[in-house]
Amino acid sequence: MFAEFLFINSNKKIEFSLQAPANFKLNSRFIKRFSAGELFDSFKAGSGIFRWRIVLSINSKPVGHLAFIFRPKICPFSGCWLSEAKIRIRYRGTGIEKRLLGEADKLLSQMGINEIFASVFKNKYLEKTVFKQLGFKEKDNRKEAVSACAYKETIERIILKRMVAI
């Protein structure tokens, strides 16, 4: 609370930008910057930008981002998925997370998207807690069989869902 109060009353220049990987890897070193209009046009056309992230910068330095993936209706897990959420440790608890998610909500609602999904491993308590603080609720559990090195293991993922704030 106190950190958020101090941060809000400081003279920091906060900017948001949109980025997409230049190849198929979401965390590619090569990125393309684009406008919200380009994202909307691509989404309406059903082609183009399916992996993108919104980046929050303070005084021109990136401090956090949310990465999204759109999966088509033919996919069993179709819809808009939050694939990554990162905030630099120095800025956690300052309200930046809410601002970043609020900006993402504006974009997603303008695109007509009313819900987003996330997936975390069942045993990752801290990740689940962060997503729940951001408004996600548990929707489903999935068990996956993983075979590696001649033994099989089952891992459980929790599917989380959040309604986009309009």
Image (cartoon, grey):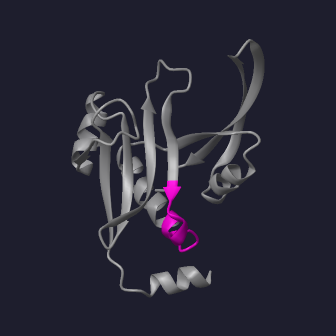
Left or right, residue 128 beside residue 118: right
Q: Is residue 3 above or below residue 160?
A: below
Foreground pick, 141 / 79 = 141
Q: Relative to 23, is 29 above or below? A: below
Residue at 60% in and 85% down = 2
Viewer-nearest residue: 72 or 153: 153
Residue at the top extreme of this rendering:
150
Q: Nearer the viewer, residue 55 or 135?
A: 55
Q: Residue at x 65, y 56 (%)?
A: 130
Q: Is the N terminus in the top left, top right, bottom left or bottom right quadrant?
A: bottom right
For the image, the number of numbered tags is 0
Q: Quadrant of residue 148?
A: top right
Question: Is 121 or 88 nearer to us in this picture?
Answer: 88
Query: What residue is shown at x 44% (from left), y 36% (from top)?
Result: 69
Q: Position of residue 91 (x, y in %)?
A: 51, 70
Percent of width and height locating residue 77: 55, 26
Q: Quadrant of residue 124?
A: top right
Q: Check if residue 138 falls in the magenta segment.
A: no
The stretch of residues the image draws in magenta is 86-97
- Seen in the picture, residue 150 relative to 136 is either above or below; the reply is above
Residue at image point 60% right, 57% down: 134
Q: Position of residue 40 (x, y in %)?
A: 28, 42
Using residue 78 as the reference point, say whether residue 161 is left or right of it. right
Q: Is residue 164 visible?
A: no
94 in magenta: yes
Q: Residue furthest front?
A: 149
- Name which quarter of the figure residue 14 lies in: bottom left
